[in-house]
Image (cartoon, grey):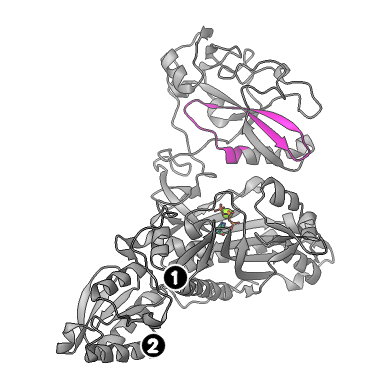
Amino acid sequence: MRLSQMLFVTLRDDPAEAEIPSHKLLVRGGYIRRVASGIYAYLPLMWRVLQNASQIVREEMNRSGAMECLLPQLQPAELWQESGRWDTYTQAEGIMFALGDRQERQLGLGPTHEEVITTIAKELIRSYRQLPLHLYQIQTKFRDEIRPRFGLMRGREFIMKDGYSFHRDQESLKETYAVMYETYSRILVRCGLTFRAVEADSGAIGGSGSHEFMVLADAGEDEVLYTEDGQYAANAEKAISQPPPAVPSTTKKSATVETPDATTIADLVACLNCDPSQIIKNVLYRAIYDNGTIVLVLVSIRGDQEINTVKLHNELSRLAPDYGAEKVLALTVADANATDWAAKPIPLGSIGPDLADDYIALNAAISPAFLRLADQTVVDLKHFITGANQAGYHRVGLSWGKACAKPKRVVDIRLAQGGDRACHDPEQTLRSARGIEIGHIFQLGTKYSQALGATYTSEAGEEHPLVMGCYGIGVSRLAQAAVEQNHDKNGIIWPLGIAPYKVIIVIPNLNDESQVAIAHQLYEQLWAAGIDTLLDDRDERAGVKFKDADLIGIPYRIVTGRSLGEGKVEVVERSTGRSQLIPVADVTGEIKSWVSATLDIAHPAYPLELPR
Ligand code: ATP
Ligand code: MG
C-alpha cells in the first residue's frame, strides 16, 4: 500500500480523551477514532492488525479441532429468560443493550453467546457419538460497560473470539480445557505478548475450573500474584497465601477497656499499643438474595488482614439455598445509620463476633440471625482484642470459649497480598504485578445445559445434561495490549506477528529518480516474497516521514537515501533502532529471513488435536 493513497493522518499531540500510552499512540498513529464513549472506528491500519490477530486465533483454534461459525448478535429475550439471565443482564447489572422490534418483541445485543449456542446444542446434539464438540466465532460483542475506558481496552463494542465446547463428562471437558490452555498460550506467543496464565475466580462454582491469560503491563486493571519459582500464579481475587504469624499477645488477663473514638484498626493499635495481628476485626455486611431475603453477615478476620469481597460473595452464593434463594443480588458493607434492618443502634466500630441477634429488626424479609463467618486467621488466636459490643469499649485478653463463642463457619475470605508466603512453599513469597485480562477459559459444567434443557443420550441410553466449557479472547483488547507492552517515546513497536505491515519503505527525496525507482523495485520484490510492505511516497519532508514511521511502529524501515550511491539502502529495525546498510539486491532476502526467523520460532509446526 502507498501512504499517499491511504487515509493516513497522524497527530502530533496526545488526544485529551486518552490516559494510557497505548490509547494515545493508537489515536495519534491514525489507527483508531473515537465515535462515542467506548465506541471506536478501526481505521485501515488497525483493521489489518485486528485481522492479523484474528488469523492467528483462527489458525490455532482450528488446529485444536474447534470449528468456526458465526452466531447472531441480535438475540431474543426468551433465550435469556430461560437461562434466568435476562433480568440480571438488562436490569441489575445492566450490561446488555436491550431493544424492541416493531412487533414489540424484546431483543438484546449479544454480550456473550452461551444462550444461543446451548439452544443450538439442545436442538442438534442427540447422542454421545457427537461429542466432544467445540464451536467458536470471532465477532463483535456489545456490553454497556459502566465505565468504558482506555480506548479498546474496555469498549462498549469490541471484538471477541468466543468458543463453547460440549462434552459427555467432566473428564472430556478437562481434556479440551487443557488443549485450550495450550492453544491460548500459543496464540499469545505468536502475537508477541509477554503473559501469565493465572488461576481465576470462577464464582460460586469454585475449584480450579478457570484460568485467565494476563498480559503484564502497569496499566492493567487486574492484580496478579505469582511466585518466582513459576509454581503459582493467580488473580488477586482468587489467590491464596499463608498470612504472617500473629504476634503473641502479652495481655493474658481478660478485661473490658475503654477505647474512646477508636473505630478503626489503626485507632485501636494506637489506643491499646498492640499489634494489629492481636485484634479480631468484625465487619458487618448486608447481602440481598434474589428472593428478596436480606441477610446480615458478620465477618471476623485478623486485624492485620483484609477481606476479599469476591471470596465472600462466592461463599454467600454457595449458601443461597440455605435462604431459599439462588443468587446474591447485592453485597454492601452495612451502613452505620441503617434503619431498615437494625432494631437498635449498632455499636459499629466496637462489635464483636458474638454481637447478639436481637440487634436485627424482626421483619419478614430479614433473616433473624447474623450469618457469622470466620476467616481461618482468627481460629487459633488466643488472648485477642475485639469489640465489646458496646460503643467505645473493646475486650482484651479474650479467648474463644464461653465468653465469646467461636463462629462455626470457618472459610477462606482473606485477601492474599504481595509479600505473603506461598501455600505450596513458605520459602516463596507472593509477588504482585498488574495484568490486562486478554483471555479467559472456564469449565462451565452443566449450568446452562440444565437451565436450557440441553441433553444427550449416553451409551447406556440415559439422558444427561451436556457438560460445557467456554473460552474467550478479547481480540481488540489484545491488539491494544500489544501496544501497551511494546512502545517507546517515539511510538508503537508492533510485534512482527500482528504488525499491520512488516516493512515500510521511505523515500526521503521524491525528486531523486533513483530513490523512487529503487523504492518501487523493492516494494514489488517484498510483496512478491509475501512480505506486506508500505511505501511512504508522500510529498513530505524526510524528517516527517521518519517520525511517522516510528509512530506507527512498522518493524522494519528501509530508506532509499544517500547510500544508494554505493548500491545500498539503510534498513532500521524499529524495536532496537539498529541500522545497517544492505546491498539493494540482498534486502528482500535478508528481511525475509529475519521475518521467518521470528515467526517460525513462535509458530512451531507440531499438530495439536482435540482428543476424541
Ligand atoms: P472484564 O473482567 O475485563 O470485564 P470479563 O471477565 O467480563 O472481562 P469475559 O466475559 O471473560 O470478560 O470475556 C472474554 C474476554 O473478552 C476478556 O478476557 C477480555 O479480553 C475481553 N473483554 C471483555 N470485556 C471487554 C470490553 N468491554 N472491551 C474489550 N474487551 C473486553
Ligand atoms: Mg473474565
For residue 136, which quarter of the picture?
bottom right
Position of residue 220 relative to residue 291, above or below, is below
Q: CA distance from mark 2 to mark 1?
A: 22 Å
* Residue in front for this viewpoint, 3 or 567: 3
Q: Is residue 130 visible to us here?
A: yes
Could you tell me if residue 174 is visible in this image? no
Residue 141 higher or lower than 241, as above or below: below
Looking at the rendering, the stretch of residues picked out in magenta corresponds to 285-312
Q: Is residue 328 left or right of residue 432?
A: right
Closer to the eye: label 2 or 1: 2
Q: Residue furthest left?
A: 566
How many marks overall?
Answer: 2
Label 2: state its secondary structure: helix
Dot 1 alpha-carbon crowd within 10 angstroms: few under 14, some 14 to 19, many 20 or more: many
Give the mark nearest the N terminus, 2 or 1: 1
Please say if 593 is above or below 135. Answer: below
In the rendered image, residue 577, in percent from the top left (x then y), is placed at 24, 69
Question: Within 10 Å of the Cα at label 2, are there few (<14), some (14-19), or many (20+) other Cα atoms?
Answer: some
Image quarter where the N terminus lies is bottom left
Residue under the point 58% across and 38% down: 309
Of the numbered discs in the image, which one, if any, rests on residue 399? none
In reply to whether residue 307 is colored magenta, the answer given is yes
**Badge 1 element:** helix
Residue ID for mark 2: 527
Horizontal placement of 147 versus 109: left or right?
Answer: left
Position of residue 105 measured from the top left corner of the image (x, y, whole percent): 81, 61
Residue ID at (27%, 82%)? 507
Q: Which mark is residue 190?
A: 1
Quadrant of ligand 1: it is bottom right
Residue type highlighted by circle 1: Arg
